[in-house]
Image (tube, grey):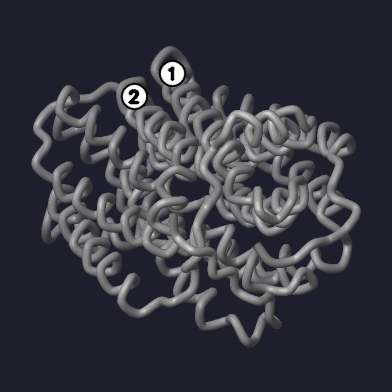
Amino acid sequence: MIDKACPSPEPFGERLGAIVILTVMFFLNFIGRIIFAPLMPTIEQDLGLTHSQAGSLFFLIAIGFFISTLGSGFVSQRLNHRRTIMLSTLILGLTLLCFGFSTSLLSMRPIMVMIGVAAGLYMPSGVAIIAAMVRRQDLGKALGVHSTAPSLSFILAPLLTEALLGWFGWRGVLTILGGVSVAAGALFVVLEREGDFPGEAPRLETAKAIVTQPSLWIMIALFSLAIGGSTGIFTMLPLFLVSERGFDHTRANTLVGVSRISGLFMSFAAGWLTDRAGEKRAIFVVLLVSGISTILLGTSPHSWVVAMVFLQPALAACFFPPGFTALSRISEPHLRSTTVSLNAPSAFLIGAGAMPALIGFTGEVGSFSVGIAVVGGLMLLGPVIVRSLKLLEIEQEGC
């Protein structure tokens, strides 16, 4: 067992350097999962996949993520949080390198599961480190910076795809990203000192204490809806634009990438709003407006599609700062990583696995628009559910 070396919570400015490094690692973790969205039209054409088969690949990533995140506490308890993040990044990079050699759907399936397994190790440790080293009153801002990683991934994944695809092909794009991830994982464990404290391995009594809290299930539902509206929509949006709205893949990927720029600023704004208005109010507003915008994305006439492609992700990105702040307050500090490891896999399995599979299925049998609108309708359940969320009355800091 590793001796616990819990950091003392400090002001946001004192921890900014460590937060930025963790954000870079989160970026590599996230882009390694979503890079397949802008590549999928090309992969579909190259390997002769159907829309439903393409959607199922994202579901396989979610299955691996589900398995890994549930067991991440066993890893972080033995390695500590810092080494767990290093391991996650190294395995993800090596798996992306392997995917570049895939020649069929059969060979892709186990690799996609392993990509999810590698990615799933990061989130509980990343959130646990930030929540431990930053003061409670600055936690929203810290997680706001951390939450820019998905937004930046959403921007750069399609833009890098278009920049590199013509030169290296889709296999080359994955090889480059895999190599960068391997190098970053090796550097992280050498350069970063934060996170030298262990996680909490899931135990029957610990899990029982957490899963019997209604707030955990409410957070799983809220995160499922939010991930469906962000990652779930993003993964199938290039296919929707190319196959149903008549865009060529270059225009579709460029549009999808540029439309995500607003998410960087909206994450900061959402973190600021969370610290002032409170988590529940922020979540209520965000899921209401992003659910409506998702419905409009699927149902708008062609002349409105570009505008909705820009509006929908800007609103959806606002959930995660208040979402993660609320998640850190539904259990005692020493149980945070376990709480995240129970919440994240279920939410990702539904939001980034089942929802893209649903959209792919509707695209196969009829229309992508129907699946997107259904996801938006489900998001409107969020403002109702969040009213029942209970947070800790005593706002505790540290590990």
- On the picture, is 44 further left or further right than 103? right
Identify residue for label 1: 361
Q: Residue at x 25, y 68 (%)?
A: 186
Q: Residue furthest bottom?
A: 14
- On the picture, is 288 further left or further right than 186? right
Element under disc 1: helix
| 71 or 114: nearer the viewer | 71
Kind of residue at badge 1: Phe
Distance between the alpha carbons at the discs numbered 1 and 2? 7 Å
Kind of residue at badge 2: His
| 309 or 184: nearer the viewer | 184
Residue 209 is drawn in which quadrant?
A: top right
Residue 267 against residue 226 in the figure, above or below: below
Residue 243 locus on image (x, y percent): 37, 32
The answer to whether any part of residue 155 appears in the image is no
Answer yes or no: do the residues labelled 1 and 2 have beta carbons within 8 Å?
yes
Q: Mark 1, residues whose alpha carbon is within 10 Å: few (<14), some, or many (≥20)?
A: many
Q: Residue at x 77, y 52 (%)?
A: 329
Identify residue for label 2: 51
Residue 259 locus on image (x, y percent): 52, 58
Q: Residue at x 50, y 25 (%)?
A: 354
Residue 331 locus on image (x, y percent): 74, 46
| 36 or 337: nearer the viewer | 337
